[in-house]
Image (tube, helix red, strand yellow):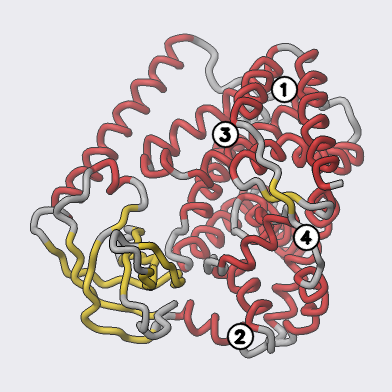
């Protein structure tokens, strides 16, 4: 068997990549800055946007009175995401298209690169007539419970969940299963490869045996996933997952080692150079952390059988990501560790639920989600100091080079898990 090679074999190649990355970043930032100057050229701008999320918020004014208003999360036609507010009695606007005037003159470039807030005035409201909206209505028609419908919309169409459902899934430790990410692309890729292989192999043997079925399958899979991503208006979570998958496929096709920290670093640098906005995305860094710990496991435990890797990897990943979850969200329950099992089962549930919805019998699987939502999680706040997260990061980096730090990392994360369970008891 031919051994795969490392991405860079000399300092010259490394320096060339660094120079190329800086050039890409320079042009990407230049384009973003040009768009920013156009956006802030006048005191106000007219924009056409789609409402992604709407919720009510209250605050105490300087006069001591309570003010209630609506918060809208919006996405413009050119991909700009931001927040604005409107009056308390505003109608339900989620998933509708609106034209508004936004006052953007005081927004800094730093705020523009992140998700910013802008004062605005709504001019017109029109229903969303896109294919995505049509699919949303088809999903809703198959479910009586609005919460169940919202979960499937998030799974298939990257629609934001309401705060109640977000809290529930955070407490159960399965928020990563609802937000479309690399895990979902991995499951979809496996299903597409299975569906493509059998019919393609039949024609390949008869008409074009000189073709590589793996290479052609990867091309078809990437094309389908690209169309899916564009159909969903390129959500950041899906964008970063797709780019990492694309880089991995290109490197694999050229015989370069994929399970390598060097490959991961190159992928991250390229993504940030092309899409600098992702530098400010918490979801991006959580996704990178997840891939980092998967690679760390596969590098140090590569001698384990495939079966043991399949069984132990979810447990390993749960322990490694638990400190991140506690430091950022602080929600924990006795059901939280069961996310290890639910993550394994989700690999079967996800493609099966898609099939049921295509057959217009999506409600057949509702009983599982209803049971999940009715679990009394007894949520407890377990606030983990950021210091422990920093310690884990340093130990993790040391574990790349020294295997003994792997055991220290396991001791640290297992201790945090036991502390969290004890905190509930």
Mark 2 vs 3, N-terminal side? 2
Count the marks.
4
Disc ID at residue 287: none
Extreme residue in the left direction: 42
Provide residue 217's location: percent of width, then percent of height.
Answer: 64, 54
Q: Is residue 344 visible?
A: no
Depth check, front residue: 180 or 149:
149
Q: Are marks 2 and 1 in contact (CB under 8 Å)?
A: no
Mark 2 vs 1, N-terminal side? 1
Q: Tag 1's secondary structure?
A: loop
Specify the quadrant of the image occupied by residue 324.
Answer: top right
Specify the quadrant of the image occupied by residue 200.
Answer: bottom right
Depth check, front residue: 196 or 238:
238
* Residue hosting label 3: 251
Mark 3 vs 1, N-terminal side? 1
Give me the residue at 20% from left, 49% from top: 36
Q: Tag 2's secondary structure?
A: helix
Give me the residue at 36% from left, 70% from top: 67
Structural crowding at the residue carrying mark 2, measured as other residues with C-alpha within 10 Å and reported as few (<14), some (14–19) or many (≥20): some
Q: Tag 3's secondary structure?
A: helix
Question: Viewer-nearest of labels 2 and 3?
Answer: 2
* Residue hosting label 1: 3
* Residue hosting label 4: 346
């Amino acid at each position: 068997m031919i051994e795969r090679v490392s991405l860079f074999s000399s300092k010259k190649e490394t320096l060339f990549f660094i120079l190329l990355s800086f050039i890409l970043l320079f042009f990407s930032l230049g384009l973003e800055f040009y768009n920013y100057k156009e956006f802030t050229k006048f005191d106000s701008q007219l924009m056409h946007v789609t409402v992604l999320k709407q919720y009510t918020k209250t605050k105490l004014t300087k006069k001591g009175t309570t003010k209630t208003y609506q918060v809208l999360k919006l996405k413009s036609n050119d991909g700009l995401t931001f927040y604005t507010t409107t009056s308390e009695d505003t109608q339900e606007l989620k998933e509708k298209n609106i034209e508004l005037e936004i006052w953007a003159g005081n927004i800094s470039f730093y705020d523009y690169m992140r998700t910013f807030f802008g004062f605005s005035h709504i001019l017109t409201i029109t229903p969303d007539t896109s294919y995505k909206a049509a699919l949303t209505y088809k999903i809703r028609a198959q479910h009586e419970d609005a919460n169940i419908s919202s979960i499937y919309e998030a799974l298939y169409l990257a629609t934001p969940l309401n705060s109640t459902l977000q809290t529930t899934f955070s407490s159960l430790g399965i928020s990563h299963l609802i937000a479309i990410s690399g895990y979902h692309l991995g499951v979809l890729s496996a299903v597409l490869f299975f569906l493509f292989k059998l019919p393609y192999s039949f024609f390949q043997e008869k008409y074009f045996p000189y073709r590589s079925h793996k290479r052609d399958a990867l091309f078809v899979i990437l094309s389908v996933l690209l169309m899916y991503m564009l159909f969903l208006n390129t959500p950041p979570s899906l964008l970063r997952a797709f780019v990492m998958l694309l880089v991995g496929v290109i490197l694999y096709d050229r015989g370069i080692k994929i399970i390598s920290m060097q490959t991961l670093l190159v992928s991250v640098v390229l993504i940030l150079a092309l899409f600098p906005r992702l530098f400010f995305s918490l979801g991006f860094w959580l996704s990178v952390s997840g891939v980092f710990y998967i690679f760390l496991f596969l590098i140090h435990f590569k001698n384990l059988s495939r079966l043991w890797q399949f069984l132990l990897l979810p447990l390993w990943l749960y322990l490694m990501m638990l400190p991140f979850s506690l430091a950022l969200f602080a929600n924990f329950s006795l059901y939280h560790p069961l996310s290890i099992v639910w993550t394994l089962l989700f690999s079967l549930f996800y493609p099966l639920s898609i099939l049921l919805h295509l057959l217009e019998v999506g409600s057949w699987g509702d009983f599982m989600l209803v049971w999940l939502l009715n679990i009394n999680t007894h949520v407890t706040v377990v606030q983990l100091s950021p210091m422990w997260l920093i310690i884990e990061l340093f130990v993790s980096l040391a574990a790349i080079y020294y295997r003994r730090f792997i055991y220290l990392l396991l001791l640290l994360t297992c201790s945090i898990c036991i502390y969290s369970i004890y905190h509930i008891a």
